[in-house]
Image (cartoon, rainbow, N blue to C red):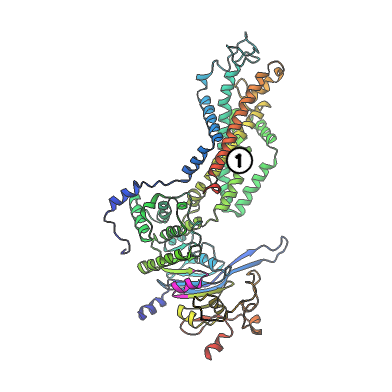
Amino acid sequence: MENKKEETKKVPLLQVRNLKKWFPSKSGVFSRKKAYIKAVNDISFDVGYGETIGIVGESGCGKSTMGRSVLRLIEPTSGEIIFEGKDFMKLKDAELRKSRSEMQIIFQDPYASLDPRMTVGEIIAEPLDIQTNLSKEEKREKILKVMEVVGLNPKYYNRYPHEFSGGQRQRIGIARAIILGPKLIVCDEPVSALDVSVQAQVINLLKKLQKDMGMAYLFISHDLSVIKHISDRVIVMYLGNIVEIADKDDLYNNTLHPYTKALLSSIPIAARNVKREKIIMEGDLPSPANPPSGCVFHTRCYMAQDICSKEAPKLVDYGNGHKCACHFCKNKVTE
Amino acid sequence: MKIFRFFTKQKEFEQEVLSSDIEYSSYYKDSFKRLKKNKVAMFCAVVIVLLILIAIFAPLICPYDPTHQDYAAILSPPSAKHLLGTDEYGRDILSRIIYGTRISLSIGVVAQILASIIGVALGAIAGYFGGIVDTIISRIMEVFAAFPDLIFAMAIMTFMGKGVLNLFVALGLLTWVRTARLIRGSVMQLKEKEYVEASKASGATSFRIIMKHLFPNSLSTIIVLVTLGIPNAIMYEASLSFLGLGVQPPAPSWGNMISAAQPYISYRSLYSVMPGVAIMITVIAFNIFGDGLRDALDPKLRT
């Protein structure tokens, strides 16, 4: 098992290097200065085969933009995306469309992600229509099988999306994403629009599908308990930057970054007599159009010192792939 | 593919799917149900169907040839022989109004369809691609919208010459801007939807996205626009014919009949009133039906 893990780590499915997405923002009609909103700013990470990477962060920290940039649904400003050794960024239109069968996306809002004028069968068939030349019968057979796999009654084949509940709609979205057998699925907050009871069902479905089909997930969420349940490794983002990457257990048991600590301390605990100090972050998320100098987190950090506002900390590996971008992590580790 | 449990009873199962007795309702089925509940709109629909039938079967219904001149009965009052009387050349007014239905309706429908084709195509392109394409198309639309409607139509008719074919073109050029603007807005809104993004994520081309997602989702808007655009075109046709730039006599059109009846309005008022009534009925029927259609298709009213 250990060996296998080592091997997969050597050849990652997806390598993202220095990914940037800067949105130009308007700054006066006559102003020549161009302002940018740095939604994703210099992000690098790897995704191994069959691995689930959780991505957490507050609203507006660039999680979704990052997920879409990796798929080139939003064209990244710069950076490298290497998928199975091929440079995904250099693909031209036609090649890009072809290689889309390898990577799919599941959306947050199950009400907006299904075309209201199409039946369930047509919605799930769309990737097949685009990517394959199967006959009608073959397609139909495949669709019915996938519907069974994701737990949809095949009787619903001819129904329209508005007749379904949120959880069922999300299953339709999942069926559409897995029908081509992709190697990577970006899950953009797939459960945050659902009831808690349905959330668990959908997450367990995603886990089961991963076990059976072996695809990797890039699982974006703001819910730390969901991330803890599904992820192998976790990336913590703040204002378009990665502040901490670690294996799940490392992150939750040996937290290094003050921002991650603050996030973890905000998870409510069900036990009555356990008291935990809550770290309350002051202020709001600064505007990504005008990020703070130095460490992006220093304006809200309880550990902030002079150096934080002057120098941006680098993402440093503290062993076992546990990386953290903070000036004061080192002291803590050596202690 | 271990995970796909093989269906042993595939055939039975498919049949179950096909003959599933649970009624599923499509969007248009639902809309039609709602439309049927709107009695006024349904009445107008019947009126429209009648008008269309009159237009199609005009030669069978007409008591006289609309261009036949009977010099023995010039400007005769309504009688058993001529139900609505005759005009200054002794032509039967009822027959001319019936034939006028043919011309007015066909001009309204054809001009509106022409306008919709131009408007939907340009509006969809502008809305979907945005950027410089949108800027160019939007400026063209603004140029067209900057002229007063009737004067613009008159200019085109004077430039291209009179005649029914040119009338189609003039009215088409006049009304496409409104369609294009609405479709542009609707496409701009729809293309941000996540199902379009999902389609893109599966590798769909722009053409496919426009045809499979954007067009079907704006179809209800287009239907309403066409229905409400037809009476508009009929009005313009009547105005142009009244001014002598539209349908040329002796071909009958409601507009040129009102124009011809002007000198006799004081003592043969029915001659000028009846074509006006015909225009009114047609325009009101299309407008109320169009409104009903819009209410029925509006997804916001859906429960």
Q: Residue B71 colored magenta?
A: no
Q: Which residues are magenta?
A: A220-233
Q: Is residue A231 magenta?
A: yes
State the image coordinates of residue B190 (x, y, percent, origin top left): 55, 52
Residue sitting nearer the eye, B244 or A200: A200
Q: Residue at the left extreme?
A: B8
Q: Quadrant of residue A104?
A: bottom left
Question: Does the image show residue B166?
Answer: no
Secondary structure type for disc 1: helix
Q: Quadrant of the N terminus of chain B?
A: bottom left
Q: Chain of mark 1?
A: B
Image-quadrant location for residue B294: top right
Residue at horizontal 47%, vertical 81%?
A: A250
Q: Residue furthest front?
A: A272
Q: Which residue is mark 1?
A: B176
| Residue B203 placement (x, y as % from top left) | 46, 57
At 68% from the left and 37% from the top, the residue drawn is B149
Of residues A75 and B232, the one drawn nearer to the viewer in this rendering = B232
